[in-house]
Amino acid sequence: AELTIERTAETICPFCSVGCRVELGIAGNRAVIARGADGPANRGRLCVKGRFGFDYLAHPERLTVPLIRREDAPKNPELHLTGADVLTLFREATWDEALDRAAAGFLKVKEKHGSARLAVLGSAKSASEDAYVLQKLARTVLKTSHIDHCTRLCASIPPLTEAIGTWTVTLPFSHILEADVALVVGSNPEVNHPVAASFMKNAVRRGTKLILIDPYRQPFARHAAYHLQLRPATDVALLSAMTHVVIAEDLIDHAFVSQRLEGFDDLKARVSAYPPEVAARVCGVPEESIVGAARLFAKAPNAMCFWGMGASQHAHGSDNMRALIALALVTGQVGRRGAGMHPWRGQNNVQGSCDVGLLPMCLPGNRNISDAGERAFFERLWQTDIPGERGLTVVEILEAAAAGEMKGLYVSGGNPAMAAPDLAMTRRALASLEHLVVQDIFPTETAAFADVVLPAAALAERSGTVTNTDRFVQLVETAVPPPGAARPDWEITCEIATRMGARWNFDHVGAVFDEMVRAVPALAGMDWATITRERQLQYPLSADPSNGGSLFATVFPAIGGKARIAALTNGSPGELPDEQYPLILVTGRVREHWHTGSMTRRAKTLDALSPESLVHVSAADFARLDLNDRERVEVLTRRGSVRLPAVCDERLQSGVIWMAMSFFEAPANDLTTRHLDTLTRAPEYKFCAARLIRD
Ligand code: SF4
C-alpha cells in the first residue's frame, strides 16, 4: 500500500562521525523514508547507510521493556547468542524492579569487593548527555575510574594530543576543497566516511592531488596521484622515508620549525636511518614513488593529512601516527585554510563522548585525572570526592574480569561481545561477572550475559547533542517516540544514580547540557537555549570565523604553545605469520554495515545489499589454495576459528586475508588478538597470523 508521509522531522545519522543531518519522513509515528538535510557537514548528502539504515528503529527485536535474567538461565561463555535467542534468558520486569535490581547489584559489589571492582563501558554512538551522566555516575557514585568506551578500539587521537595538545581536528574535512594536496593514511573513506569521501572526490576533480597510503588497492585509489601500496605494518618506515626526503632536499618549513616546533633535531637523526631506497625494500613501494609523494606533499602551498584505523589499530599504531604527524609538522602543513590534520573519528559521537570525559585517564574537558587541582574543580562542581587514579581501558577491563578481578560492569550502548578482540576471552569475562547491567536498543550479544537489561531510546527518539568529526555540536530532537517503555540513556543512568544515593537535579536533558558546558572548556559560550535555537555550533566559539574552522594559525594548545615531535620506535606487530599460521588477517568494515551490525543488520535494505560475511583472499592465495568462488572455508588463528565463504580479491596483497567485523554468523573478533598499542591501548585489529583451510 502507498504510504502517506504525515510529517517530517530531522535527526542526525547514528552511524559515522561525518554527522550527516537527516530528514525523516514519518507515517503513523514510524520513519518510512530518509533524505539528506542541509547539515553543516553533509549539505544534503547521505550515503547508503544514512538513506536506508533507519528501519532498525521499528525492528520487532527492539527492546521495549526492562528484563531480568531468569534464575534457570546460567551464563554460558561457550554460547554466542543474539536477538530473540537472548530474550529467552530473561523475564519481563517493571522499571522500578529492574532499576532497583541494577542499583542493588552495584551496591553489593561495592560493599563486598570495593569500588575498584566496578567498571563502566559507554558508547560513542550515545549522545553527549548520556556520556556525561554515565561518567559522572562512575566517578561520583560507583567511585571508580574504570570507565571507557568504544573510541578506545579506534584510538586515532592520542598522538595528536601528544604533539599539539588537543584531541580535536585542526580543521574540518571539507577544507579539502581548498587543499592542493591531501595525504590519506590507513583509511578507506568511500566505505567508512562515504559523504566525506564524496567531498574528497569533488576536490580531486577540481585539482587537489591525492596521496593514498594503504596496503589495500581500494577503489578510491583510482583518484590518487600516488597510491603507495605498502606492505602491512610498514607505515613507520614509509613515512620516515618521506620525512627523510623532505629534510634531505631542504623542503622543510624553516620558519615553522624554528618558531613553532620542538624535537626537530631528534627527528632528523631518527629519519636518517630511512633513505627512500631502504624504505622501498621494507615497504615494497617503489623508491621514486616515495620521493615523488614526499615532494608533492612538502611543496604544496596547502596540504591536509587524514588518517584512519589502518594507521591506528596496530600494536605500534601510535608510532604510525607519530611518523605522519612529524611529516605534517616539519613541512608546516597546519594552521591554515586547507592545511592541517584530520584524524577520522569512527562513530557519530566519538568527539562528544571524549569531550565529556568518558575515558579512564581524563576528566571532562580533557583534564588530567592525576592532577589534584583539576579534580578539585570537579569535586566542587559535583559536591563529592572522586577517585584520582587512572582507570583501565576497554580490553583491560575485560581482561580483569576474565581474571576474576572485575566483579560488576555497566554497559551502556556498547557491544563488547562482538566488538572486543579475542571474543572467547571476552565472553569468559562477561560470563564471570557477578553483576552485569546492559542498556541498549536491541538484545545484543553482550546482553546475553546480563543480569539486568534496560531498554533505551535510539538517537532519533530523544533529544540531546552529538559532536561530529569537525567539532560541530549538533542538536538531535525527538523525531519518533521510543517503542514501548524504552527511555533515553541519560534518564536511565540518573535513575540508577538516585537509587544509589545520588541527589542530581537533571529534570531535563538541557540541564545536563548546561552542566556539561561548565565542565568542558571547549563548549564555552554555549547553553541549551542557544543550541536549541541554532541547532549546530562549531567549537571553539571564540575562533576567528574567517578561518572557516581551521585552528592554530599562530599557537598550539600544548604547554608553551609549540608543537612537539614525539620519539617513536619502528616496532613489529604483536604476532607475525609463521609456518602454522602463514597468512595475515586484517579486519574492517563494509559500506553497508556499521561496526557490530546491531542496527544495520536489522535494516532490511542494508542487509539485503550485504547479507553475509565473506573472507577476502588475494588472487595468488586463492589460486594456490585451489579455491572456488564462495567456497566455504575455515579461518583459524590462535584464538579461534570461523567458517564462511571465500571470495577472490585482486586488490589484496599476496599473503593477506580480510574480513568484516559486523557479522554475528562469522565473528571476525573470534580471531583477533589482544595486543594493545602502548599509548592508545587500541587492539591490533589490522594484523594477526591466520590459517585458511577448506571446510
Ligand atoms: Fe553520513 Fe556517515 Fe551517516 Fe553515511 S554513515 S549518512 S556518511 S553520517
Image: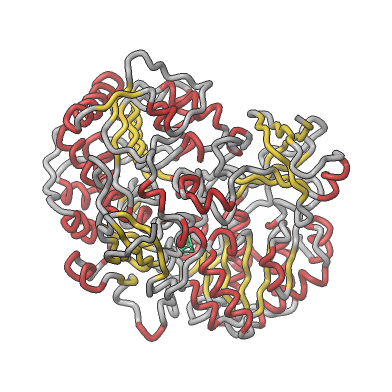
Q: Is residue 509 visible?
A: yes
User: Residue 351, how many percent across, how many down?
Assistant: 39, 58
User: Residue 419, how many percent across, how many down?
Assistant: 51, 40
Q: Residue at x 52, y 56 (%)?
A: 156
- Say above or below: 83 vs 475: above
Q: In which image quadrant can residue 688 be found?
A: top right
The N terminus: image quadrant: bottom left
Q: Nearer the viewer, residue 3 or 144?
A: 3
Q: Nearer the viewer, residue 616 or 215?
A: 616
The C terminus: image quadrant: top right
Q: In which image quadrant can residue 43 be found?
A: bottom left
Q: Residue at x 67, y 43 (%)?
A: 614
Q: Residue at x 38, y 71 (%)?
A: 37
Q: Residue furthest front?
A: 1
| 363 lies left or right of 568 | left
Q: Residue at x 28, y 23 (%)?
A: 109
| 651 lies left or right of 51 | right
Q: Is residue 270 visible?
A: no
Q: Nearer the viewer, residue 101 or 261?
A: 101
User: Residue 487, how many percent across, how many down?
Assistant: 24, 44
User: Residue 373, how many percent across, how many down?
Assistant: 25, 51
Q: State the count of labels.
A: 0
- Say above or below: 337 vs 383: below
Q: In which image quadrant can residue 440 be found?
A: top left
Give the colouring mode of the picture: secondary structure
| 287 lies left or right of 633 | right
